Image (tube, coloured by chain):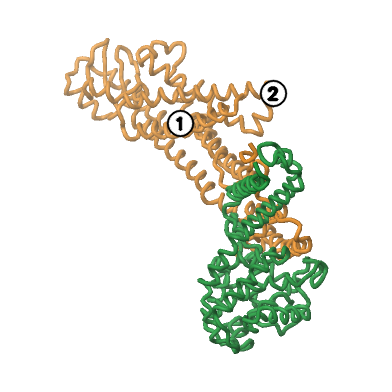
């Protein structure tokens, strides 16, 4: 058997192992990135117990622990990326119809914007910090969180509506606003790709970046993805800054931040105990108490909290 | 003992408890509704076997707990006293003697009256049947309204105390009545029957059937009059007696050469009606506790505690306690407000500060055993 055949065989085994792990019923309700997070953590925690079996003749007899570890994690990341990219493409070329571009100050070509968004997602998925941030974004998007809250906010014509239409002056309809927020969410994690460890947010433990850092990243992104409208890039980047520190952050950026963070905690499969409030209402209440810590807009959280409470979300 | 066998036996006991409650209800309903003696006899015999089964169950549990040195714990904490009261006294003083009377037939038992007036004993301990209702408490323990052991214990305790109080009050009333000289319906009927018997015995024995019918109109409970083995008067045909009358349904008075048979059915019906009322009362009390109080307890006490406990123990559990507006000033909900507004946000900040270390892991080694074989 040639070396290439052996490698191919090992790759197939690793792929099968990962696929079976991902198919575990305990992970059935999770999305791709959540599964990836769980499996990586599982492999990490149980590394010692797993290795004697994985190095046995049945699995990877000619590889050492480090090589097996590398093969399994690379396979996992690769398989997840393929699935996420497919989903992202379906979003970009299907569910986000780009009609909002017609209403922005800058003219932008829909197809070029789509390609730029796809490139941005690929860049995000290559960066561990950005990839982790993208998990919340991805969860929010596939669970249609922006649609739920934008629609209700526009109908209510209260604080969120006022901030979007009157203050940020986004002359978009209800439908277009939803699409705009989704596109903003897709780009949000891009900021993290400009962060080296320890820079910007202290290595990922602070929930937001300083405004000047975000501003400079925004300019860099504009330079790199010229097809993207400035307003969209600014909304995506500013969502990583704190509203408490910078009250000029646009409403769309504030919504993007809230949706992305809600997505991080969002587990539609979680069993709600009798005596507990709903998942979203619980999250908004906690977020309201921590609004300064996360840099959220308190009034916006109040409105979303009320929407969640009234709709039993 | 094998867990499966224990589980099967426990299930059998639960089924038996449900069945004996139905049997108890039907036994009284049969009297009130005037079911045939064959059916009622079947119910009486089944009652004996149920009591025998529960006596064996109690003795087995007692023997096992004695073997483990836990007899006191079984009798007091695990409500063995209910097992005892709802089995041994019933078998010894109610269903046992009743079955003997049924099997021997009323004539033979009357012959044995010199040793033991079984009918009277049975009558006196009839009230002990109320103790059967205590078995309903054994079912309460099995109903899991919530995962909370505390909720189950509280519900079982309240139900035990309530039902036991009702049952003991009824028992006390039944035993105190004769002690205080308050005559019951059966005593009054017995006195009247005695008077009738004396009056008839004093009259001319050679009267014709018309005169007897006239006599019977004066006392509707008079069924049959015999003199030296010869029937002088009978209200019904023999077929009616054999299909509708059991040994508990009539009383026999001997006055000189006469033997009188009197109808006790009205008293029996009165007693069974009372029993049915007690039964319905206790079932309603228990159902009210189970269906109304139990959810209230869960909603206002055990559920909020359960949510807070999970929030404190599980890293990825972020649900807040639902504060019930009308009970918002209860201690539990005041505590829950602190949990919602202080603990959960603090936990969230703490989690953020240690990211990207870990999230709660839903996968464990047990989940992938097949993958590694």
Mark 1 and mark 2: span between their CA atoms? 30 Å
Residue bearing mark 1:
B20
The foreground one among B229 and A248 is A248
Q: Which chain is green?
A: A
Residue at coordinates 73% horizontally, 38% vertically from top-left?
A52
Chain containing the residue with disc 2: B
Question: Where's residue B316, x and y in %?
Answer: 68, 56
Indicate whether A292 appears above or below A276. Answer: below
Name the mark on residue B188. none
Name the mark on residue B68. 2
Indicate whether B133 appears above or below A228. Answer: above
Choose mark 1 or mark 2, whichever is in front.
2
The foreground one among A83 and B220 is A83
Residue at coordinates 62% horizontally, 62% vertically from top-left?
A266
The reply, left or right, for residue B112 in relation to residue B325 is left
Q: What colour is chain B? A: orange
Question: Where's residue B325, x and y in %?
Answer: 61, 65
**Which numbered disc, 1 or 2, marks the residue that appears first in the sequence?**
1
Residue at coordinates 66% horizontally, 66% vertically from top-left?
A134
């Amino acid at each position: 058997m040639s070396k290439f055949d052996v490698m191919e065989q090992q790759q197939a085994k690793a792929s099968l192992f990962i696929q079976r792990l991902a198919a575990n019923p305990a992970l059935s309700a999770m999305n791709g990135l959540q599964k990836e997070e769980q499996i990586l953590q599982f492999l990490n925690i149980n590394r010692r117990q797993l290795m004697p079996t994985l190095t046995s003749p049945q699995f990877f007899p000619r590889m050492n622990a480090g090589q097996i570890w590398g093969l399994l994690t690379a396979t996992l990341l690769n398989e997840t990326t393929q699935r996420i990219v497919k989903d992202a493409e379906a979003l970009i070329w299907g569910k986000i119809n780009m009609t909002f571009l017609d209403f922005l100050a800058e003219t932008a070509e829909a197809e070029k914007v789509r390609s730029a968004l796809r490139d941005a997602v690929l860049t995000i998925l290559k960066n561990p910090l950005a990839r982790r941030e993208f998990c919340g974004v991805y969860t929010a998007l596939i669970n249609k969180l922006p649609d739920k809250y934008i629609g209700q906010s526009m109908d209510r014509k209260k604080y969120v509506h006022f901030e979007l239409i009157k203050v940020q002056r986004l002359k978009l309809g209800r439908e277009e606003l939803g699409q705009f927020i989704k596109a903003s969410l897709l780009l949000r994690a891009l900021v993290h790709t400009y962060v080296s460890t320890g820079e910007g947010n202290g290595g990922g433990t602070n929930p937001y970046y300083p405004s000047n850092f975000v501003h400079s990243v925004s300019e860099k992104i504009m330079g790199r993805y010229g097809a993207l409208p400035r307003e969209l890039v600014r909304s995506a980047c500013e969502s990583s800054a704190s509203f408490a520190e910078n009250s000029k952050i646009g409403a769309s950026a504030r919504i993007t931040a809230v949706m992305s963070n809600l997505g991080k905690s969002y587990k539609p499969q979680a069993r709600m105990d009798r005596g507990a409030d709903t998942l979203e209402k619980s999250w908004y209440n906690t977020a309201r108490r921590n609004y300064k810590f996360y840099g959220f807009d308190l009034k916006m959280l109040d409105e979303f909290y009320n929407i969640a409470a009234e709709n039993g979300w | 003992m094998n867990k499966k066998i224990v589980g099967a036996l426990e299930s059998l006991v639960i089924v038996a408890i449900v069945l004996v409650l139905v049997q108890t209800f039907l036994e009284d309903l049969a009297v009130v509704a005037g079911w045939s003696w064959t059916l009622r006899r079947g119910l009486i015999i089944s009652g004996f076997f149920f009591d025998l089964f529960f006596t064996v169950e109690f003795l087995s549990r007692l023997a096992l707990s004695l073997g483990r040195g836990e007899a006191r714990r079984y009798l007091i904490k695990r409500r063995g006293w209910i097992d005892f009261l709802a089995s041994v006294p019933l078998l010894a003083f109610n269903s046992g003697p009743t079955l003997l009377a049924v099997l021997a037939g009323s004539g033979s038992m009357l012959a044995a009256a010199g040793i033991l007036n079984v009918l009277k004993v049975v009558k006196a301990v009839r009230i002990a049947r109320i103790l059967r209702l205590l078995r309903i408490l054994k079912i309460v323990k099995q109903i899991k309204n919530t995962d909370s052991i505390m909720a189950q214990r509280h519900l079982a305790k309240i139900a035990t105390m309530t039902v036991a109080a009702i049952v003991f009050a009824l028992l006390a009333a039944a035993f105190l009545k004769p002690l205080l000289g308050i005559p019951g319906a059966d005593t009054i009927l017995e006195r009247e029957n005695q008077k009738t018997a004396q009056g008839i015995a004093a009259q001319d024995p050679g009267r014709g059937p018309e005169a007897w019918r006239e006599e019977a109109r004066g006392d509707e409970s008079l069924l049959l009059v015999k003199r030296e083995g010869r029937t002088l008067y009978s209200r019904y045909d023999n077929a009616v007696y054999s299909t509708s009358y059991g040994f508990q349904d009539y009383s026999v008075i001997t006055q000189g050469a006469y033997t009188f048979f009197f109808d006790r059915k009205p008293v029996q019906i009165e007693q069974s009606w009372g029993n049915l009322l007690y039964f319905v009362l206790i079932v309603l009390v228990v159902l009210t506790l189970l269906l109304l109080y139990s959810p209230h307890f869960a909603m206002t006490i055990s559920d909020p505690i359960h949510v807070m406990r999970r929030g404190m123990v599980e890293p990825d559990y972020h649900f807040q306690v639902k504060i019930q507006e009308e009970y918002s000033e209860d201690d539990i909900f005041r505590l829950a407000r602190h949990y919602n507004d202080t603990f959960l946000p603090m936990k969230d900040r703490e989690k953020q500060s240690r990211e990207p270390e870990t999230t709660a892991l839903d996968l464990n080694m047990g989940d992938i055993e097949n993958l590694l074989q």
